[in-house]
């Protein structure tokens, strides 16, 4: 029975992967690449390479959708042809019939995790680099322009409440891979005097672990906002953290990082103390962990809904799948936004859609089993 059900599930699953991948790719990448070919002169062979590099990222999202479609189509067909009724007549419970789909969904979960963690981020990052190089874009693959890095410190007020204030602000217009250009640093970490550094360029000195600033001016400002001193320099070394350089070198889009890279980025953001960025990254990390498990939930929901005695064609199954998928992604967006706003914890915000889907699947399973 397991072998028979598995063989019945494979064909619609592959059909779903092809269908959903094609639709998402057409919406997400194909039209944009064609526009760049026509308007920006992007070579066709580069456009094809980028298109293929985008495939793993899109397939990550098509696997759960295909699992839902495959289980719903297969179990609906078996139900309409009375094969599930025959199995129940032989003493096979609904729980046992659904178990096959759930186990296979676990296998798809592992594949989704592999793609989402190892293949898709690297391929997506490579696609970004390839496109930037082909167009000779001024927007490089990592965060080379408008590098902004704030540091905060906490202090306790007289009433015992704790507040955060800006301790140091690092800004650079551009990073070319070797040096920062167009720098402005506001340093309020020293007691009694604030330091403002304006410099044409700066490099990190690996041997001395300091910054080498070139062609700039240092303004020393007293706490009463009066000028204390102005120093012009051609070369000046300053003890400032390396974190802005690390941020420029390692910063990627969320879709271009695996969990390990996202955790490293989180540590960098924590040094800056920007609570909004920290919380957003925490939510993204939890979503990255939680997302592959939706395959199991979709497998459960699809097989249970398909087991309900009815006559459902492929079109109806596809329509139901789209509704379920839309509902899941809507809940995922809402819970993610609530988590980023601080209303929900990052853990709850990421896992809430999965918990809701699991509760729905178990509820439907219990109802079908009682029939």
Image (tube, rainbow, N blue to C red):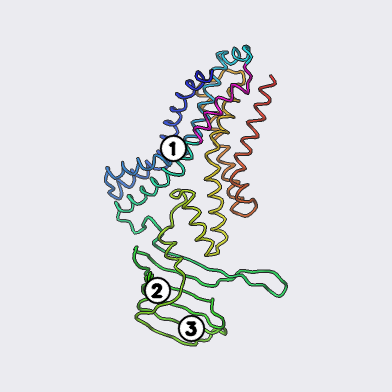
Work out how far the residue at label 3 is from the one at label 1, CA to CA, in angstroms.
55 Å
Query: Of the residues under marks 3 and 1, which one precedes in the sequence?
Result: 1
Mark 1 closeness class: few <14, some 14–19, many ≥20 residues within 10 Å: many
Instruction: Tell me the chief SS of the magenta region.
Output: helix
Seen at 58% across and 23% down, the residue is 306
Query: Of the residues under marks 1 and 2, which one precedes in the sequence?
Result: 1
Q: Which mark is residue 304?
A: none
Is residue 288 located in the magenta-colored stretch of the structure?
no
Is residue 108 located in the magenta-colored stretch of the structure?
yes
Seen at 44% across and 31% down, the residue is 17
Quick one: SS at disc 3? strand
Seen at 40% across and 60% down, the residue is 249
Residue 364's place in the image compared with 120, above or below, is above
Most distant residue in the front direction: 207
Q: 170 or 316: which is nearer to us? A: 170
Seen at 54% across and 79% down, the residue is 190
Query: Of the residues under marks 2 and 3, which one precedes in the sequence?
Result: 2
On screen, residue 231 versus residue 333, left or right, reads left
Quadrant into which the N terminus falls: top right
Quick one: SS at disc 2? loop
Q: How many marks?
A: 3
Residue 15's place in the image compared with 224, above or below, is above
Work out how far the residue at label 1 is from the one at label 2, CA to CA, in angstroms.
47 Å
Work out how far the residue at label 2 is from the one at label 3, CA to CA, in angstroms.
24 Å
Which residue lies under the disc numbered 2?
Answer: 208
- Range covered by the magenta-colored residues: 92-109
Most distant residue in the right direction: 159
Q: Which mark is residue 220?
A: 3
Which residue lies under the disc numbered 1?
Answer: 59
Q: In the image, residue 364 lies at what x, y percent?
A: 65, 27
């Amino acid at each position: 029975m397991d072998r028979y059900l598995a063989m019945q599930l494979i064909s619609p699953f592959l059909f779903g992967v092809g269908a959903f991948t094609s639709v998402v790719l057409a919406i997400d990448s194909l039209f944009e690449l064609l526009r760049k070919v026509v308007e920006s002169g992007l070579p066709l062979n580069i456009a094809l390479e980028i298109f293929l590099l985008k495939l793993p990222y899109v397939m990550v999202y098509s696997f759960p959708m295909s699992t839902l479609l495959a289980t719903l189509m297969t179990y609906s067909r078996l139900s309409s042809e009375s094969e599930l009724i025959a199995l129940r007549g032989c003493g096979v419970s609904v729980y046992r019939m659904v178990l096959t789909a759930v186990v296979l969904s676990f296998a798809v979960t592992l594949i989704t995790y592999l793609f989402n963690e190892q293949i898709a981020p690297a391929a997506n990052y490579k696609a970004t680099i390839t496109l930037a190089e082909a167009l000779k874009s001024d927007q490089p693959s990592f965060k080379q322009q408008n590098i902004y890095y704030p540091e905060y410190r906490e202090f306790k007020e007289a009433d015992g409440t704790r507040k955060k204030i800006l301790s140091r602000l690092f800004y650079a217009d551009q990073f070319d891979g070797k040096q920062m250009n167009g720098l402005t640093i506001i340093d309020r970490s020293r007691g009694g005097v604030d330091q403002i550094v304006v410099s044409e360029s700066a490099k990190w000195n690996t041997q001395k672990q300091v910054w080498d600033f070139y062609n700039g001016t240092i303004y020393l400002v007293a706490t009463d906002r009066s000028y204390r001193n102005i120093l012009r320099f051609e070369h000046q070394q300053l003890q400032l953290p390396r974190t802005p350089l690390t941020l420029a070198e390692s910063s990627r889009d969320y879709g271009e990082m695996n969990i390990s890279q996202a955790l490293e980025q989180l540590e960098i953001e924590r040094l800056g103390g920007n609570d909004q960025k920290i919380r957003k990254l925490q939510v993204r990390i939890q979503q990255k962990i939680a997302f592959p498990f939706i395959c199991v939930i979709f497998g459960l929901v699809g097989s249970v809904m398909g087991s309900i005695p009815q006559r459902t064609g492929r079109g109806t199954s596809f329509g139901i799948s789209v509704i379920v998928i839309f509902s899941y992604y809507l809940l995922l967006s809402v819970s993610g936004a609530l988590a980023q706003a601080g209303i929900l914890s990052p853990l709850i915000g990421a896992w809430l859609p999965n918990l809701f889907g699991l509760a729905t699947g178990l509820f439907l399973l219990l109802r079908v089993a009682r029939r």
